[in-house]
Image: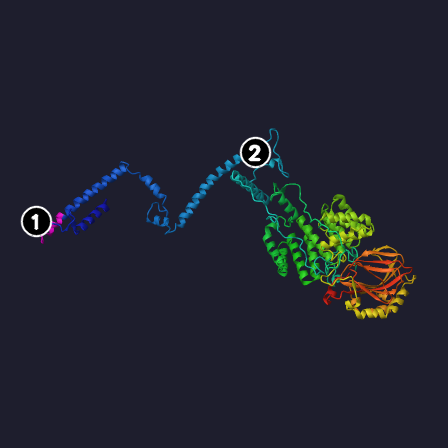
Amino acid sequence: MAPRKNSRNQSKKEVKSAAVVNKNGVKAEAATASGGGGVASGGGSAASVFSGSKIFTWFMVLALLGVWSSVAVVWLDLVDYDNVIGKLSAYDADGDGDFDVEDAKVLLGVKERPVSLVKREAKEEYAVKEQIEPIVEEVIQTTELTEEEEQLPSNPSQEQQAPEGESPDAVGAPAKSEDTTEEAFEGKLAVEAGSFEAEAAVEVEETAVPLPPIPDDFVPDDSRDEATQPYEESKQFTDRPGSQEIQEAEPESVPEPDADLEPEVESVPELDAESVPQLKSEAVPELEAEPVPELKEEPVAVEEKTTQEDSEGNAEDQPEDMLKYKAKKKKPKLLNKFEKTIKTEIDAAEKLRKKGKVEEAVRAFDTLVQQYPQSPRCRYGKALAEDDLAEKMRSNDMLLKALSTYKEASALPNATPDLIKATLKKRAERQQFLGRQRGALATLQKLVQIFPEDMALKNDLGVAHLLIGDNKSAKRVYEEVLAIAPSNGFAKVHYGFILKSENKIAESIPFLRDGLESGDPGTDDGRFYFHLGDALQRMGDDSAYKWYERGHQRGHFASVWQRSLYNVDGLKAQPWWTPKDTGYMDLVKTLERNWRTIRDEALSVMDKTTGLFVPEEENLREKGEWGQFTLWQQGKKAGESCRSVPKTCGLLEHYPEATGCKRGQIKFSVMQPGTHVWPHTGPTNCRLRMHLGLVIPKTGCKIRCTNDTRAWEEGKVLVFDDSFEHEVWQDADSYRLIFIVDVWHPELTQYQRQTLSPI
C-alpha cells in the first residue's frame, strides 16, 4: 500500500504546478477561492488550496471508478482472464511466460528465438514420442497377429516350424539380455530391422503404387560385397587384340618358387599348327557363297526360380529381368565376416590399383597384410597389385612374386569360396602366360577338386591338358562334362577338336557344328570354324565354305581364302608374289644360282640308310608319302642337320630374313607319287614361303593357292603366301623334291620381327 501512497503524493506535487483546463477548453491559471474574485498577484496561497482540492477530487472519482471496474471484472466474471492469458501464451515466442513486444519481434522475424527455448521444446517432443511409440508398436503387433491368425491353417494341431538351421524353441524367443556376443548383436539388429519392415508395411499398405520397370542396365548395389571384378583382362603385347601374347625372353631362367609344381619342359606342344587365335588382313577375292545368317548371340542362362536371397539369406520375390541380370553379372563374394569391417581400408587400396597407381597400391596392400595377416582379401589384393606392377615393369620376378601371393591368399583360413576360386583361376592364368603349363594344370586340378560341380573349371582343366599335348586326359575331362551337361557348347567344340586330331573326321563334325551353333561362351573361336570347315572339306561337303564365311563375318578370318590365325593387321595380302615384290631379290638369286649344290646335299640325306627325312606330322595328307628334313625351326638352327648339309646352311647364314624368321621354317620336302595334300592354310600372315625346285617331274605335280594353280620348275623359286588356302597334288611317276625357305613378310618392322612370338 505504501508505494501507491507515494505515487499519489507525487501526483499531487506534479498537479500543483500544472495548468488547469476549464470545461470550455480554455487554458487558465488557478483562481483564488476567497472573495470569489480573481487575484492577479499576491493571492498564491488561496489559489494553491483551490487547485489542489479540485484535482484531488477528480482523482478520487477516477480512482473509485477504476476500483469498481476491477471488482466488476474480477468478482462478477465479466472477462475470463485464464482463457485470454492461455490464448496469448501461444504467441509467447521468447519463453518468458507472457506476450509482449519481444514476442512480437520474434513472430515478425526481427529477432530469433532463444536457443534454450528450442532445446527445451525438442526435449519435450522427444519425451512425448517415447510415451507414444510403445502404444504404436503394440498396435502394429496386434495388427500382425491378426493377419497371422487369418493365415493359420484350419488344423489347430499344426505347429509353427522354425526356419532352417534353428530349433523350434528359438522361434519368436526373445534374446537374452546378458548375451553380448557379436552374433547376439547381429541378431538384435535383424529383429529391429524386421520390426521396421513390418511397421513400414503397415504405413504404406493402403498407399502402395506400382514401381517403374527396371531398366536392363540397372546395377543393384550390394553393401555386403565389394564390387571388384576378380578377372580383369591383362594388357599383353599381342599381334592384335585376341592373339597370342609376346613373352619375355627370360622366363625360363627364373625358377618357379612353388615346390609342389613340376618343372617345365623347354618346349610345350601346341594344340595344332593352326590352333591359335585369328585376325583380319587385307581382303582378297572370295568364293561366291550363299549369305549366311549371323550366329546367335551368346545367351544368358536364366534360373527358373523367381526368388533371390536378401541380405539376411531369406528368399524374396524379384522380377524376371532382375534374375536375368543377376545370372549374367553375379558379384563374387570376396569378403569374409571380419573383412566387411575393414572394407573401407580395402576399397581405398583397391581404388589406387584401379587408377593405375600400382606402386602405391602394392604398398597399401602390404600395409594391410601386415595389419591383418589372416585376411585373404588383403593378400589377394596385394597379389593383384603385384601382378599389375609386374606387367608395368615387364618383370617376370615380380610376376613370380604375385604367383606366390596368390597361393598364400587361397590357403588362408576363412577365405570365401569365391575368393579361392578367383585367386586360383588368376594364378593358373598367369602361370600359363609364363609358359608354366604343368604348374597351371596342377592349379586347375586343385580347383576342380574344391569345386567338382563347376563345369567351367572342368572345361578349363581340359584346355590345360591340351596345352601340354595330353589329348587323352583332355578327352576324358570333356566326356565327363558332356555326361553331366550334354548341351555344354564349350565341351562340344573341344571334344570335336580332339576327335578331329585323332583323324575321326566324320565323328568330329556334329560336335564342332553343335558347339558353334550353341553360341556358348568360349565357342566363338576361329580354331573351331577352321577345323569344322576343314573336316567338311575332307568329307567332300561344300558347306565348308559357308562356315568359313561365317568365320570371316565373325572377324576370325581375313577372308574365306585367308584363314590364318596368328596375324598382324595391315600387312599386304595376296596369294602369289614375285621375287621382286618381296624385296628379297638377293636371297632369291643366291638360291637359284646354287640350286644344284643345294639339290646334291638334299639327295645325300635322302639315302634310305640315313633316315634323316621324317614323315609330315600335321595330318595334312589325304594319301601318299611326304617327308621333310628341317634345317631351321622358329628361327633356331638345327645344328646336327646342318652338319649334314654344310654348304646349304652356309649359303643361308647371310640372310636373317630367313634364318631369323621365328614364324617359319627352312627345310627340304620330298613327296612321293600318289600323294595328295588336303586344302589347308598356314598359321600366320607374317611370313612368305619360297619353294625352290630341285627335282621336279615333267608332269603330274602342281600346287593351287586360292583359285590359281601353278607348277614348279627346277632351279626356279615360287613365292606365295601360305596363309591363303593351298592344295598340292603329286600324280607323277617319281618323287618331287623342293627346298622350302620361309621369310618374314617384307612389311614387318624390325621391332615386330624381334618381338613377335615364335610359331
**Residue closer to the observer: 570 or 499:** 570
Residue sitting at 31 percent across and 40 percent down?
Answer: 81
Circle 1 packing at 10 Å, graded few (<14), some (14-19), many (20+), is: few
User: Disc 1 marks which amino acid?
Assistant: Gly
The residue labelled by disc 1 is 37
Rendered location of residue 318, percent (x, y): 61, 42
**From this viewpoint, which residue is outermost toward the left?**
35
Q: CA distance from mark 1 to mark 2?
A: 107 Å
Residue 755, position as x, y percentages in the image: 73, 64
Q: In the rendered view, does 256 fall on the left or right side of 1? A: right
**Mark toward the start of the polypeptide (1 vs 2):** 1
| In-image side of 676 versus 549 (left or right) | right
- Please check the rendered image and state whether residue 40 is part of the magenta-colored stretch, yes or no: yes
Q: Are marks 1 and 2 in contact (CB under 8 Å)?
A: no
> Can you tell which mark lies on residue 148?
2
Magenta-drawn stretch contains 84: no
Q: Nearer the viewer, residue 740 or 521?
A: 740
Range covered by the magenta-colored residues: 32-50
Residue 634, percent across and down? 79, 63
Q: How is the image coloured?
A: rainbow
Helix, strand or loop at label 2? It is helix
Residue 660: horizontal and vertical position, in percent? 78, 66
Frontmost residue, 41 versus 465: 465
- The label number, if any, that marks residue 375 in the structure image: none
Residue 301 in which image quadrant: top right
Q: Tell me if I can see residue 296 in this picture.
A: yes
Q: Amino acid at mark 2?
A: Glu
What residue do we see at 34% from left, 48% from top? 104
Question: What is the secondary structure assignment of the residue under circle 1?
Answer: loop
Local crowd at mark 2 within 10 Å, few (<14), some, or many (≥20)? few
**Can residue 464 be seen in the rendering of this structure?**
no
The image quadrant where one finds the C terminus is: bottom right
